[in-house]
Image: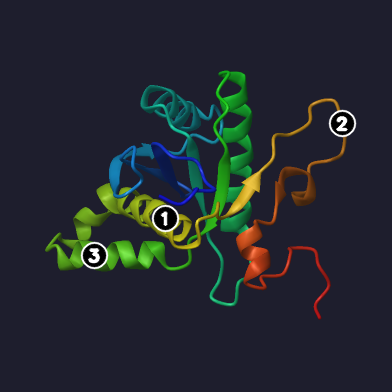
Amino acid sequence: MADQRFPQGVKLGIDVGMARVGLASCDPDGILATPVKTLSRDAKRNSDIKVVVKEAASRGAVQIFVGLPRTMKGEEKASAEMARSYAGLLVSLLQDAGLDVPVHLIDERLTTVSAHQALNKAGLDSREHRKVVDQVAAVEILQHALDMQKARNANVGQFVRPRKPDVVGTDGPAQNEEVSTISTQIGVPEKNAPAS
């Protein structure tokens, strides 16, 4: 088998919403993403992020993907900022727990739409979607990341860097993440790069 340039093992996928957070996991071989649970978003105490950290520890996760919602034009709005903030908090709480689990932001355009479509095809009444749609979206985020890793034999997404506690005023995107080699290879511009 060819040398693989991404971690092997259980990975988690997260769909961050205003009210709920969907969580998915995959098998140790990284073949199939499956739903885990839906958590209520707790922006004050971050109890939902603490549950994710516990899940990462108990499952021996080697990587976590957080969905980054963008518009069809690739722009980032408030929901993308919320996902970036969530990913940053997750990295901090993982570190506090002594876990060295890399977190990557992954483009999740249309995952919620796809999740609703899949639930409709499965015959689930639209009123019942709310209970599981976040988990299904998390599954789609994680499966997309797994498939891209295998196809490209490389890590994918934007790595979320740990915040440096001793440095003041470095909370911008350049400090907390880096553009993946995949983004660079396919010509996706860096967030603050001038348009060509």
- Ranked by sequence position, the earlier of labels 2 and 1 is 1
> Disc 2 marks which residue?
167
Q: Residues within 10 Å of mark 2 (few under 14, many from 20)?
A: few
**Could you tell me which residue is drawn at 66 percent across and 70 percent down?**
188
Q: Is residue 75 visible?
A: no
Tag 1's secondary structure?
A: helix
Residue situated in front as seen by the camera: 129 or 72: 72
Residue type, mark 2 in image: Val
Label 1 sits on residue: 141
60 with respect to 118 (left or right): right
Q: Which residue corresponds to mark 3? A: 118
* Front-most of residues 69 and 176: 176
Up the image or down, 185 lies above or below 88; here it is: below
In the displayed structure image, the side of residue 142 where residue 131 appears, left or right: left
Viewer-side label of 3, 1:
1
Q: Please give the name of the residue rendered at 53% of the width and 30% of the height, measured from the top-left corner.
A: 46
